[in-house]
Amino acid sequence: MNYWLMKSEPSAFSIDDLKSMPNRTEHWDGVRNYQARNMMRDTMKVGDRAFFYHSNCKVPGIVGLMEVVREGYPDHTAFEPDSKYFDEKSDPNNPRWYMVDIKYLRHTRRVISLAEIKDHASLENMPLVRKGNRLSIMPVSKNEWDFILSLEDRPER
């Protein structure tokens, strides 16, 4: 099993939006970065776990847990001219962009903020805290996953 962190702006798609979807499942569309695309297309597998991370908000941080329930497949929004994710160079016969389906598992017991994550030496190698990393999807090691989950029951720093 692999572990991931997936970012979304809560004003665009939040953990509560995911929870309210039929079967608490939705596709993770609109990713327009080749490295993140490659992870969804080539590496993410059914059963993988992911942190839902709210970005570009007052308190960015981890707000929930998700599971990958469908492996990478072409992102149809790239082919829809009315979509904000439309890409005129993407071809349905040779798709450029991919997405996965994710399922809501639960909210974290509290927001585990970016500031708190940065405050722990054991998380200093996470792509999330490295300077210049703006990927919307990134791998998380098993040790990082377990450590972050252990923070839920600790008082916020």
Image: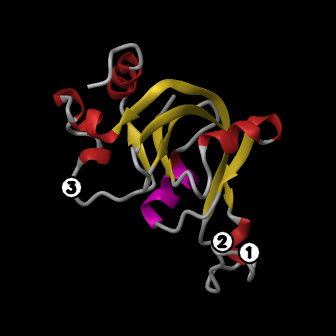
Compared with residue 80, is residue 31 higher up or lower down, i.e. above or below?
Answer: above
- Look at label 3 and name its amino acid: Lys
Which residue is the site of mark 2? 95
Tell me what residue is drawn at x 52 percent, y 60 percent: 37
Tell me what residue is drawn at x 46 percent, y 66 percent: 34
Q: Is the Cβ of the residue at disc 2 closer than 8 Å to that at disc 1?
A: yes
Q: Is the Cβ of the residue at disc 2 closer than 8 Å to that at disc 3?
A: no
Residue extent of the magenta highlight: 34-42
Compared with residue 90, is residue 53 higher up or lower down, i.e. above or below?
Answer: above
Marks 2/1: CA–CA distance: 5 Å
Which numbered marker is on residue 131?
3
Mark 2 or mark 3: name the one nearer the start of the chain. 2
Specify whether 156 is left or right of 81.
left
Tell me what residue is drawn at x 70 percent, y 51 percent: 27
Q: Position of residue 36 (x, y in %)?
A: 47, 57
Specify whether 37 is left or right of 68.
left
Question: Can you name the residue that lies furthest to the right here?
Answer: 22
Q: Position of residue 64 (x, y in %)?
A: 54, 32
Which numbered marker is on residue 92?
1
**Residue 98: within the magenta?**
no
Which numbered marker is on residue 106?
none
